Image (cartoon, rainbow, N blue to C red):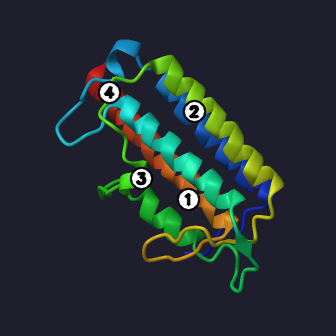
Amino acid sequence: METLKLTKGQMLHELQDILDTFVYEFERMPAEKINSMPFAGSWTAAQVAEHLILSANAFVGLMQGPTQDTQRPPDALVDELRTILGNMEIKMQSPDFIWPAENEYVKNEQLNKLQKVTELLFNAAATLDLDKTCTGFELPQMGHITRRESVAFITYHTRRHTHQLKNIKKALV
């Protein structure tokens, strides 16, 4: 599969679109259902939102953290990220630092956090040099990724969890 070679503008549009879609889907969840377990082995809708909040905040920190010049094509891992995160048949294990707590979440508080982190993410992606390699954290099996790959990860990760949120909604509503 060949890399899509998206421009920065296209990447920002795709990122904003999927973040808006997730927020839209979460907004439409009945407040009394966001903390309900839809089926065994699942997170609640609120936990999915919390996971995205934690993950997005981690990526904002990564993107704003230390970088170095990239010694490979800055989008070399984009196809692999799209393939891995786009496979809805496999269940992935989240790292502990972005694992959502088993709390009773308040819908409006989650929406406010989603809005804030969305703005932070979009601002970082829009204003930073996406071709730099982030050195503050390594992805398992991938190592250091570029800011461009970080934007791709966030986009595909959010798309994955939007799909999950829709399945939770179907089970509960």
Q: Which of marks 4 and 3 is nearer the N terminus?
A: 3
Q: Is residue 54 left or right of residue 64?
A: left
Q: Where is residue 98 in the image (x, y as percent from the top left)?
A: 42, 49
Q: Earlier in the sequence, mark 2 or mark 1?
A: 2
Estimate how packed mark 1 is, as few (under 14), some (14 to 19) or many (20 or more) residues with alpha carbons within 10 Å: many
The Cα atoms of the two marked residues, 3 and 1, are separated by 17 Å
Amino acid type at image mark 2:
Leu
Q: Which residue is drawn at 78% across and 61% down?
A: 7
Q: List the residue tagged with mark 3.
A: 97
Estimate how packed mark 2 is, as few (under 14), some (14 to 19) or many (20 or more) residues with alpha carbons within 10 Å: many
Q: Is mark 1 on a helix, strand or loop?
A: helix
Q: Which of marks 4 and 1 is nearer the N terminus?
A: 1
Q: Where is residue 39 in the image (x, y as percent from the top left)?
A: 20, 34
Q: Which of marks 2 and 3 is nearer the N terminus?
A: 3
Q: Earlier in the sequence, mark 3 or mark 1?
A: 3
Q: Position of residue 57 (x, y in %)?
A: 58, 47
Q: Position of residue 143 (x, y in %)?
A: 52, 77
Q: List the residue tagged with mark 2.
A: 114
Q: In this view, does 80 lie to the left or right of 133?
A: left
Q: Which residue is drawn at 46% across and 39% down?
A: 162
Image: 57 above or below 85: above
Residue 166, picture quadrant: top left
Estimate how packed mark 3 is, as few (under 14), some (14 to 19) or many (20 or more) residues with alpha carbons within 10 Å: few
Q: Earlier in the sequence, mark 2 or mark 4?
A: 2
The Cα atoms of the two marked residues, 2 and 4, are separated by 22 Å
The Cα atoms of the two marked residues, 2 and 1, are separated by 17 Å
Q: Which residue is drawn at 52% across and 40% down?
A: 53
Image: 162 above or below 155: above
